[in-house]
Amino acid sequence: MEITYYNILLPVPTEGVYTYFSEGLLHTGERVVVPFRKREITGIVLEKIEKPDFECKEIIMVCDNAPLFSKEYITFLKNIASYYTCPMGLVLQGILSEKILNMEISDTEPVKKHPIKDIILTNEQQEIADSIQLNTYCCHLIKGITGSGKTEIYQEVAKKVINSGRQVLYIVPEISLTPQLIERLSYRLGVEPSIYHYKLTHKARKKHFTDFVTDNSKFMLGARSALFVPAKNIGLIIVDEEHEHSYKQDESPSYHLRDMAVMYGNILNIPIILGSATPSAESIYNAECGKYVLHSLLERPNNATLPKIEIIDMKTTNLIGSMIAEPIYDELSNIVKRDEQAIILLNRKGYSTYLYCQQCGALAECVNCSVGLVSFKSKNKSLCRYCNTEYNILTCSVCGSKIFQEYGYGTEKIEEFLESMFPDKIIRIDTESVSSIKTLNKNLKRFENKEANILLGTQLIAKGLHFPEVTFVGVLGIDNLMALPDFRAMEKAYQLLVQVSGRAGREHLSGKVYIQTMNPEVPIFNMLDNTDLEFYRWELSRRNITQYPPFTKLARLIFSYINQEECYNTAKITANTLKSLKEAANLTIYGPKDATLAKLQNKYRYEILIKSSTNSDLNKALIIAQQIFNKCKKGAMRLKIDKDPYFMM
């Protein structure tokens, strides 16, 4: 047989493209097993090439009868690698787990059917649904007030796509949003959706992956990783809560799911729907520039109204238990008496948020990270929220004392206080109290069944949940979020407040929202109940003055190493070299300086920020920075390149 040569993409943290030969004809997108160093590894056929002038190894096995990955999907991988200046091998490794890449595509059983429960859209909803054209690329941004029925529009368009014989991919930021959604989608679309996220068992992931890849399932509901399931018949991608920072991948490739969904939709030539009550400033800017089509939903169905929002100045208000403003406590008492329901948001876990030495006043910090410890009364331990190191006994690093005073409060302490006031009326949901999806679903169901009057939690409970009996929302501790050293701090605070406020008064009962703060003069508090673009005009004006995204392209280079001096020197050499380039005239380069978290997991960290007016100039700088680092680095020193960063810590 004729010997042919192919470039194979492998999921390895290098460029990832290697050449092998085969005695049979292969096709782009097929999976093959090849020898790589001392093991065998599954890769993807990219292209047939001429015989190279170096020796190649033979492909061991072909895994598929037909290509699993389409040419459009491979183009997608190449575009991700190009945009994030990341090797293709690292892209493949970062978006598909080895188990998924190696899995056998087996026969599938028919997807469970459901009787369809039709819904009647409002005129406002129907108009938006009708304007979304199928079979052509366009990015639609739906900005709808909380409870306005964005999901109903998604479902209406999804039904059209499914009836046309194509598939729908519906992406949500948190798996906590899926339990209620699954039931609603099943009965409104007539089919049970495939579910895909990292907390499923491998067996369940394999089933849902196979169903969607083989077109046995027409609808997939999933978290971030669902975008990279290589189905060939996708006709619509929906990204719900498009503003959510959890869509940003922390490790390389540090992609943003929303932006990659838009990129993929353009490649596939299909419509994209981005939805949120509080879209990102970047998305509003893209709509104003004509890149997206903006749709607005300004009313709640069935005459439901937005809740009334009241800002409580903690400097002039009595605090119950030194934590909760008296008006919030009074409202909770009335909720319990009326047997209604309330949500209390505090975006901090644990019992107390700071521990100070009672003898010298030093802050108790993690020995591995430059961050204060959080105490957990239920565990009788203190914990670092970054490296998860636990401390049974604390010793002051300054004076050696073992006596510490607790300050601040987290959800655990608020729960203890509320339980003492309203016994058996509280359900707490945060990542400490909810260790599995099963427990999360159970607690949400308990609240839905009115087994408790008060749902207390972190931002897990702030969005996407629908409880008709919730008439009150109280917000604690928002000042901490606004004080973060992050140019998006005000935007994140605004989004969280609007989202959690929207949990109140969603149906027949009116709602109230009380927000306690030490800084009532902050401008965003006056914009929370506005349905127009006032906040975005204010925020974009601030960004323009300081030249932050979307007015510039931004990248953050983070150097980390166990030796502080060598880490700094490498960062300094990189920064100085970049500043000396002829392209530097088009760049603004800051640093190196201590990262906000100057020490993390026992490694010192320095950062360089690079701003550029063009994507091409920024990418050139990032490629050069990586080359400089590769020449200068010591031992296990690491450089993380975060393009379009969402986390400035």
Image (cartoon, rainbow, N blue to C red):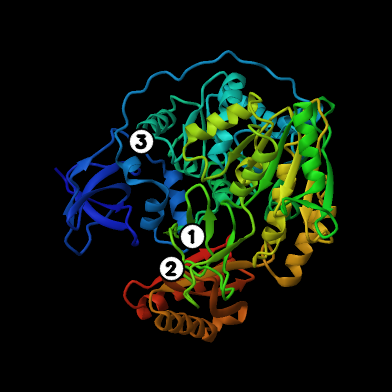
SS category of the residue bearing label 1: loop
Q: Which residue corresponds to mark 3? A: 202
Alpha carbon distance from label 2 to label 1? 9 Å
Residue 168 appearing in the image: no
Report the residue at 75% width, 46% height from top: 498
Residue at the extreme left of the image, as rendered: 1
The residue type indicated by label 3 comes to His
Which of the pair 123/391 is nearer the observer?
391
Percent position of residue 265, x then y = 56, 43
* Disc 3 residue crowd, few under 14, some 14–19, many 20+, Cα 10 Å: few
Q: Are marks 3 and 2 in contact (CB under 8 Å)?
A: no
Q: Which label number is shown at residue 384?
A: 1
Alpha carbon distance from label 3 to label 2? 33 Å
Q: Are marks 1 and 3 in contact (CB under 8 Å)?
A: no
The residue type indicated by label 2 comes to Asn
Report the residue at 44% width, 35% height from top: 231
Q: Are marks 2 and 1 in contact (CB under 8 Å)?
A: yes
Which of the pair 597/367 is nearer the observer?
367
Which of the pair 85/303 is nearer the observer?
303
**Whether residue 417 is situated above or below residue 38 in the rendered picture:** above
SS category of the residue bearing label 3: helix
Report the quarter where the C terminus lies: bottom right
The residue type indicated by label 1 comes to Cys
Give the foreground label among 1 and 3. 1
Percent position of residue 427, x then y = 61, 35
Q: Which residue corresponds to mark 2? A: 368
Alpha carbon distance from label 1 to label 3? 30 Å
Percent position of residue 610, x then y = 58, 73
**Whether residue 27 is situated above or below residue 319 in the rendered picture:** above
Report the residue at 53% width, 24% height from top: 165
